């Protein structure tokens, strides 16, 4: 048994002006790729020969350039062409890669692969919980598994489930088509899986995992900062009996719709209230998440709105962390510690999030900016402006773990307030503190979806339109002929 294995990932925020190019992707090949993927041991335990294709991954960004997509897609296709006798293909994708001029990158990647291998080779995919799945993509795959946690802690488990789904297809000589039921809902940061309806949905998915005839099952929250006709929640189930797959997908969708109003933002406040609340006396640290400039949702991280608010108050013990300022950082890296310089952040901008901000700063430290996988992606500096400390970076950064702070030479315990470019708080940051405030800042990753200016989104989407009924949802599905 021979299985091909690879990964191509970038979560796209289509409202961002920046683009992800060839150089923005980390790349792994050969044994290094196989060691990175949790599916590999499952295949090897089953006696399969696992052939590495390519592992390329980028930080959440704006759209992927057509040049970058075509470059990596062609590498995948060329490698697959060299392996004529494969029994199956396993891919770890994101599900919300949007390519300039094309749309769903996952769809066009899978179409290119199918042109090489035909329809009889089963393909299984592991996807992010925030995947937006086009019909064209779903027609190319046979088994679909997705993260069941947000914040995400089950990536490896998802890979293992997808690997087992592929093995089931190979052993049973089946290539089922997944059934999908779409739910017109924009979840955003409110859709964490520790609350209903996701608790019950996850329980049902776990039951389906062990049932005869179920090849794969998943429920996706979608990624709301992605402007397409297929943005939103969906249930996807592959069964050997197609009628059963459609029935199970419908039941998952009903379960979600019935309890959708439980999904509300926790600790959320307007900017002024968030800043004031963060400065109130308390024991320990509090994180303030700059949700409208959330780099983990593709924003560029150049926003200065929260920084300006803290500079006005000039209170000790405040750190504003991870502002992208490439040219300024590169100049400060040439200076000696202790030097004082006048800098201008967001020069030339006067937007709600990016506002030209002049600061006289003192250089305190230099450090390394780490990426998602613990790799070096750039450099940064710690500077002070009055009583406020600021981390500036020359690469887009997401400070999602304690290690990201330590690599910058920053000790979180030195502060009472830490503002970060994030939405909900990532799990590893809770080892520092579970105290956080969700600042409802404006920007391209805002949770106020009505102000984002969608052009391609379906007109009927909850909660932008709260008058939508379940009957409306069913009617739309019938019109789309997706759930027949």
Image (tube, rainbow, N blue to C red):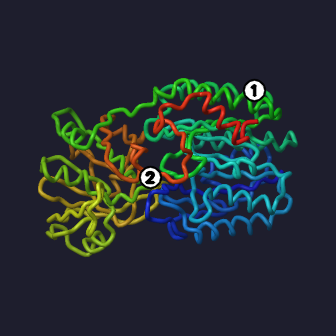
Residue 401 seen in the figure: no
Name the foreground residue: 404 vs 439.
439
> Which residue is depicted at the point 70% across and 28% down?
208
Which secondary structure, mark 1?
loop
Q: With respect to residue 12, does 202 lie above or below?
A: above
Apparent side of residue 397 relative to residue 102 in the rendered image (left or right): left
Which secondary structure, mark 2?
loop
Name the foreground residue: 54 vs 455.
455
The percent position of residue 132, horizontal first and vertical second, equals: 59, 47
Apparent side of residue 3 relative to residue 61 in the rendered image (left or right): right
The percent position of residue 372, horizontal first and vertical second, equals: 47, 54
Viewport quadrant of the C terminus: top right
Apparent side of residue 268 relative to residue 89 in the rendered image (left or right): left
Q: Where, by quadrant of the figure, is residue 250 drawn? A: top right
Q: With respect to residue 7, does 238 lie above or below?
A: above
Apparent side of residue 381 relative to residue 297 in the rendered image (left or right): left
The percent position of residue 270, horizontal first and vertical second, equals: 27, 40
Name the foreground residue: 410 vs 424.
424
Residue 420 seen in the figure: yes
Label 2 or label 1, whichever comes before in sequence order: 1
> Which residue is depicted at the point 25% across and 43% down?
271
The percent position of residue 187, horizontal first and vertical second, equals: 49, 38
| Mark 2 or 1, closer to the camera | 2
> Which residue is depicted at the point 75% across and 26% down?
211
> Which residue is depicted at the point 29% across and 69% down?
329
Residue that numbered label 2 is attached to:
453
Residue 87 image label: none
Residue 211 image label: 1
Tell me how far mark 2 sits from mark 1, CA to CA: 43 Å
Q: With respect to residue 233, does 376 lie above or below?
A: below
């Amino acid at each position: 048994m021979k299985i091909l294995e690879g990964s191509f990932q970038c979560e796209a925020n289509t409202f961002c002006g920046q683009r992800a190019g060839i150089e923005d992707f980390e790349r792994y090949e050969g044994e290094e790729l196989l060691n990175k993927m949790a599916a590999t041991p499952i295949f090897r335990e089953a006696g399969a020969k696992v052939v590495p294709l390519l592992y390329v991954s980028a930080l959440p960004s704006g759209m992927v350039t057509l040049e970058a997509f075509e470059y990596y897609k062609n590498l995948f296709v060329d490698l697959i062409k060299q392996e004529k006798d494969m029994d199956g293909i396993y891919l770890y994708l994101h599900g919300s890669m949007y390519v300039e001029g094309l749309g769903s990158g996952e769809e066009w990647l899978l179409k290119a692969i199918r042109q090489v291998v035909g329809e009889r080779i089963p393909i299984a995919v592991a996807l992010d919980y925030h995947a937006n799945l086009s019909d064209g993509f779903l027609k190319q795959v046979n088994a679909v598994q997705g993260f069941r946690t947000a914040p995400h802690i089950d990536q490896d488990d998802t890979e293992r489930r997808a690997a087992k789904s592929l093995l089931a297809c190979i052993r049973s000589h089946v290539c089922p088509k997944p059934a999908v039921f779409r739910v017109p809902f924009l979840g955003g940061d409110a859709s964490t899986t520790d609350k209903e309806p996701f608790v019950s949905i996850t329980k049902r998915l776990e039951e389906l995992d062990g049932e005869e005839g179920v090849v794969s099952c998943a429920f996706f929250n979608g990624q709301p900062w992605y402007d397409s006709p297929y943005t939103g929640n969906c249930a996807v189930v592959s069964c050997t009996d197609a009628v059963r797959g459609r029935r199970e997908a419908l039941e998952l969708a009903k379960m979600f719709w019935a309890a959708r109003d439980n999904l509300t933002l926790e600790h959320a406040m307007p900017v002024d209230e968030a800043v004031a609340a963060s400065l109130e006396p308390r024991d320990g640290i509090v994180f303030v998440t700059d949700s409208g400039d959330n780099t983990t949702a593709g924003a560029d991280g150049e926003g200065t709105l929260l920084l300006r608010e803290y500079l006005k108050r000039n209170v000790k013990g405040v750190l504003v962390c991870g502002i992208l300022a490439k040219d300024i950082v590169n100049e400060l890296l040439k200076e000696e510690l202790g030097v004082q310089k006048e800098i201008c952040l967001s020069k030339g901008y006067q937007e709600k999030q990016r506002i030209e901000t002049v600061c006289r700063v003192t250089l305190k430290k230099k450090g390394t900016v780490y990426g998602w996988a613990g790799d070096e992606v750039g450099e940064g500096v710690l500077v002070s402006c009055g009583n406020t400390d600021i981390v500036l970076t020359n690469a887009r950064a997401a400070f999602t773990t304690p290690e990201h702070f330590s690599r910058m030479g920053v000790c979180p315990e030195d502060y009472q307030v830490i503002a970060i470019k994030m939405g909900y708080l990532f799990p590893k940051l809770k080892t520092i503190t579970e105290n956080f405030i969700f600042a409802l800042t404006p920007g391209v990753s805002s949770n106020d979806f009505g102000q984002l200016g969608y052009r391609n989104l379906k007109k009927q989407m909850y909660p932008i339109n709260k008058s939508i009924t379940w009957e409306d949802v069913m009617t739309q599905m019938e019109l789309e002929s997706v759930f027949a």
